Amino acid sequence: MSALVPSAALFGPVAYFFFLLAVIGSVGAYVAVERLLRSSPDTGTDLTKLAKKELGLATAFSSLNPKGGFLDRLDLFLIRALRLDTRLEEIHTMLGRPLNPTPLQMLHMKELMAVLAMIMIFLLTDSPALSLFGLTAFFLPDMIFNRQIRSRQTEIMRQFPTMVDLAALTIEAGLDYMSAFDRIIKSSRIKGELENEMEKTLGEISLGYTRRDALRRFAMRTGLQEIRSFVGLIIQSDELGTSLVDLLRNYASDMRFRRLNKAEKLAAQASTKMLFPLFIFIFPTVFIMMLAPMMKSLMTGGLGF
């Protein structure tokens, strides 16, 4: 019996060690899957270089003090260990650079989510080892931010084709493209995300940015390939002196064609997607309604004929 005492005493630390390994493995697996599924930016383009330059100059984490309080040191540790500075700056840019939340506030939201999840798991299980799985909640705010980015991009793309047509008409009337954007913003009754981004672009030009840099910042804030192509057309027209109206006309027609193909693709997928609710909800109900009287007759003494 005395030989069993050391093994029993060692069981607790070994169990905690394996639980810790499981938590670290879960976090590592999530990070690996998230990086694999994340769309990689187009490396080598001028837009990507500009984005990196912007993110490097206007960092939101420069106010953190390495010798400050516990929260500052924790923030710096997480930023350096997980390389979150660039990622959070990119998310903030894709959200349109709102005043709230800032990249630092996003980091604090992730930390708060992990702490709350650990406390909740500990209260439910009364196990410090299991509560470590709450660390995976550190990545849950990313899902919220990504959903907001997709919603914002959907709204921008809903308004973008109309804006391109209006810009082509206004430029054809004799205005340059910046004056055309200003006229479109002033004539719009309801300002959406696209109008707000265009207004930011005009404001940056009035503050001293070149048109090229302001347009590229506009494309960087939206994160949409369609707007990157639109900005590339405008810059190409400025450099080569080609007719911007013809380029916008061709681009608008091509965009309508792609939207039509996307709508046809979604319509073709609708029939396939309907199979799952049919098999799960509709067919069982129909079979029950058809076979229930027959099964009742069999159980009560035959079919009756």
Image (cartoon, helix red, strand yellow):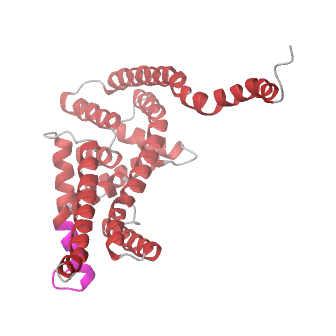
Rendering quarter of residue 96: bottom left
- At horizontal 19% and vertical 49% (from top left) the residue drawn is 50
- At horizontal 36% and vertical 37% (from top left) the residue drawn is 177
Against 273, residue 209 (above or below) is below
**Residue farthest to the front, as pictured:** 1
Query: Which portion, as a residue range, is magenta?
Result: 65-80
Residue 63 in view, yes or no: no
Rendering quarter of residue 296: top right
Q: Nearer the viewer, residue 123 or 162?
A: 123
- At horizontal 46% and vertical 48% (from top left) the residue drawn is 193
Residue 285 locus on image (x, y percent)? 70, 31
In the rendered structure, the answer to whether residue 136 lies left or right of residue 65 reads right
Residue 221 locus on image (x, y percent)? 33, 49
Q: Nearer the viewer, residue 165 or 284?
A: 284
Counting the numbered discs, the total is: 0
Instruction: Report if residue 203 lies within the magenta region.
Output: no
In the rendered structure, the answer to whether residue 10 lies left or right of residue 256 reads left
Residue 83 in view, yes or no: yes
**Secondary structure character of the magenta stretch overall:** helix
Q: Nearer the viewer, residue 39 or 258?
A: 39
- The quadrant the N terminus occupies is bottom left
**Residue farthest to the right, as pictured:** 304
- At horizontal 21% and vertical 67% (from top left) the residue drawn is 79
Instruction: Report if residue 69 lies within the magenta region.
Output: yes
Residue 56 locus on image (x, y percent)? 17, 60
Against 8, residue 248 (above or below) is above
In the rendered structure, the answer to whether residue 51 lies left or right of residue 141 reads left
Q: Nearer the viewer, residue 277 or 149?
A: 277
**Residue farthest to the top, as pictured:** 305
